[in-house]
Amino acid sequence: MTFYQLLAETWRDTMEVSLPVFGPELALCATILILLLLKMFDAGGKSSGFYVAVLGALAALYFAAPWRYLAGGATIDTPIFTGMLMFDSFAVYMRGLLLFFLLLFISLTQISGVPAREEGTEFYVLIFGATLGMCLMVSANHMLIVFLAVEMVSVPSYVLAGLLKGRRRSSEAALKFAVFGAGTAGVMLYGISLLVGTLGSAHIPTMAARLADLIQTEAVDERTLVLILGGLMVAVGVSFKLSAVPFHFWAPDVFEGATAEVAAFLSIASKAAALGLLVRLTLGLGTASGVDAMTALEPARQYMSGLVALLAAVTCTFGNLAAYGQTNMKRLLAYSTIAHAGYMMMAVAAAVALAGHSPAGAQRAVAALAFYAGIYLFMNLGAFAVVAFLRNALGSEEIADYAGLIRTSPGLVVSMGIILFSLVGLPPLAGFAAKFTVFAAMFDAGLLLLLAIGAINTVLSLFYYLRVIRVMALPSDNDAIPAAGIRLSSIPGAYCFLVMLPLVVFGVWWNGLFDWANAAAATLPY
């Protein structure tokens, strides 16, 4: 192929194939530019950028259009930008989830009043920039995109964690987050360089094919240590984004120091994007076209499945045990987030274990993860929204200060109770359906020990969630000073109720969302 033919092919691929399906990312970029221009010409600082952000999120969600691509079980599987990214059903689902959360999150910040009006434009620029990186993470098909996308998410997150200027705990959280994040990014980059240097390519499917060739020709023996070390280093970077043990140490301090709104963003969007990336890497590097190649890659899949299963078991167990002694609601939810990351990683371990043997079972495992991520959005957003609104009403985020809320905010307490019971996984709420699908995937994969650990942890989590509900439902020690109330008929109360409502609806009628999740998983390699 001549240079001019290469140029023409690249131009055709970009203009005719890639850009038409890259609309959500382009909408996010355009919104960032408009917000920056708005800040430039808004000399008095009167605009918060809220309406621009809402329109930008709506435009991005419209271009993502998961209702169009996933309806009826339709499948898409198209490499874009010369194979750097994948436009497939999984990317469509995860992008739609992230952009829908972005819309709900922007609404939450407007209702709660964080950030302040004069800081709103910069805040939304950072949020949209991080969301752009997350959309690239769930579509990544090349190691260069993997690293760039992770850093596009990380750098704005460091700034968001220190949003509360002049507050020492917030500044400390941002500094810890940045230092630990930079360290893990360096480790991940070195791991990528080891893998790419050993396999001779940064394109993930090509890396898998060359790894299979090395195993088949028995040339991998002398490079096994380098490949294992590189894989572990890449796992460090992904585990940090997931706050998986032992790379969870930033999460409790950052969640406590940051605002509840930022903690919700890190807890939901960042986790969903990291899980999407984990699926891309494990299945992308563990599968290749051809029966011989799939057979050759069996040791790699066993290694990755065992590593993810071990991290998942330790992560959910530590998260649930550490949550017991917490007195601050944001720290408790931080450890809860760690535990739920462990549950969702169990589905990835099951998918990798089933790949190559039972493609249908592996697809169900990925569908279980996608379904869990959709339910998790409503559970954690609702919990952090309640914390944010109670912070405004009570001036505190300590669990003890929630005592007696049942008298002044009965509707809010009931909503929070449903959210927390769904986080436990009690029927007939949506959290039960989400955990049931993940546990069923582990049973299909024969990961019975991991299944038992997940079931035991579900029981353990009941007690610390129940403690919060008990404090809210019992009267305060000082009945002379009634707790401030949030009526369900108020805007904050209505927001919490609307976010909680899908947990009841999807607990009974969850086939629709699960069908989308199943369609999302259909095009991944197994």
Image (cartoon, rainbow, N blue to C red):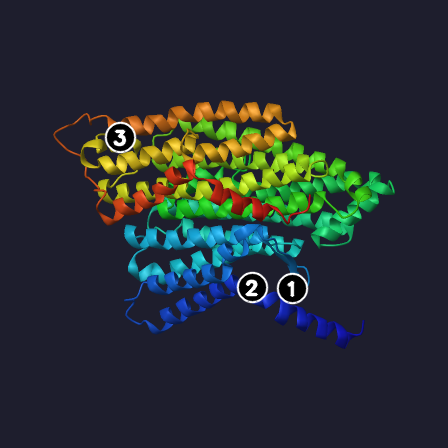
Residue type, label 2: Phe
Q: CA distance from mark 2 to mark 1?
A: 10 Å
Q: Which numbered circle lies on residue 472?
A: 3
**Neighbourhood count class around disc 3 (C-alpha, 10 Å): few under 14, some 14–19, many 20 upward:** many
Q: Residue furthest front?
A: 72
User: Horizontal and vertical percent for residue 197?
Assistant: 76, 51
Find residue 327 and report its horizontal and vertical position in percent.
34, 30
Question: In the rendered view, would you say 45 is above or below 509?
Answer: below
Q: Is residue 62 left or right of residue 411?
A: right
Q: Describe residue 497's horizontal placement relative to residue 12 as left or right.
A: left
Between residues 81 and 429, which one lies in front from this camera angle? Answer: 429
**Secondary structure beneath label 3:** helix
User: What amino acid does circle 1 point to?
Assistant: Phe
Q: Can the viewer see residue 222 in this picture?
A: yes
Q: CA distance from mark 2 to mark 3?
A: 46 Å
Residue 138 in view (yes/no): no
Considering the numbered disc 1 on the image, is that residue within a helix, a strand or a loop? loop
Of the two numbered discs 2 and 3 on the same chain, state the one appearing first in sequence: 2
Disc 2 + disc 1, Cβ < 8 Å: yes
**Residue closest to the eye, 412 or 307:** 412
The residue pinned by badge 2 equals: 22
324 sits left or right of 347 in the view: left
Instruction: Name the residue at the bottom extreme.
Output: 4
Identity of the residue drawn at 72% across and 36% down: 357
Residue type at the position of mark 3: Met
Q: Residue at x 60, y 41 (%)?
A: 236
Say the numbered circle drawn on residue 81: 1
Give the quadrant of residue 225.
top right
Within 10 Å of disc 2 (Cα), the crowding (few <14, some 14-19, many 20+) is some
In the displayed structure, 381 sits above or below 118; it is above
